[in-house]
Image (cartoon, grey):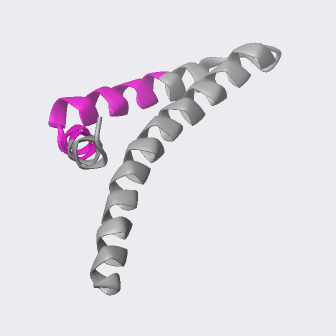
Amino acid sequence: MDKELREAKAKSLLSDELFNEAFSMLETDIKDTWYRTSLNDTEAREQAWLSLRLLERIRLHLTSIIESGDMARKLGKHQL
């Protein structure tokens, strides 16, 4: 897949209402699970924390694709 198509798809995903709703619901569910863990349930809290970090990394990866395309265009304009 070429860079422009990847960027367009990433923009489409990040602007999609259903995609954002799904991420928000997952984040809320994971946080609720985290908050409901008992004091001694370290494994469940760590799993919830890792799940939250994974959600963040997915969103950051898509954002990075968009920002890389923006930077490439800006650099291309300056080199002309």
Identity of the residue drawn at 27% across and 36% down: 20
Q: Which residues, given as a range, are shown in magenta? A: 9-29
State yes or no: residue 20 in magenta: yes
Q: Residue furthest right?
A: 40
Instruction: Kindly give the residue lying farthest to the front in the view shown.
Output: 80
- Tell me the residue at 29%/69% (across/down): 73
Task: State whether the magenta stretch is mostly helix, strand or loop.
Answer: helix
The image position of residue 61, as x and y in percent, is 46, 43
Q: Is residue 11 left or right of residue 26?
A: left
Residue at horizontal 67 percent and vertical 17 percent from the top: 37
Residue 44 to residue 3: above or below: above
Q: Quadrant of the C terminus?
A: bottom left
Please state the horizontal and vertical placement of residue 79, each as a whole percent of the image: 34, 83
Tell me how many marks there are: 0
Q: Nearer the viewer, residue 21 or 55?
A: 55
State the image quarter where residue 49 is shown: top right
Of residue 41 and residue 16, the one placed in the foreground of this image is 16
In the picture, measured across the screen, residue 13 lies left or right of residue 54, that is: left
Residue 34: name its quadrant: top right
User: Is residue 11 inside the magenta stretch?
Assistant: yes
Residue 67 percent coordinates (x, y): 37, 60
Q: Is residue 29 left or right of residue 14?
A: right
Q: Residue 52: name its quadrant.
A: top right
Query: Residue 38: percent from the left, percent from the top?
Result: 73, 16
The residue located at (16%, 37%) in the rendering is 17
Residue situated in front as seen by the camera: 52 or 28: 52
Front residue of 69/57: it is 69
In this rendering, position of residue 16 left or right of residue 30: left
Locate the N terminus and report the quarter of the image it occupies. Answer: top left
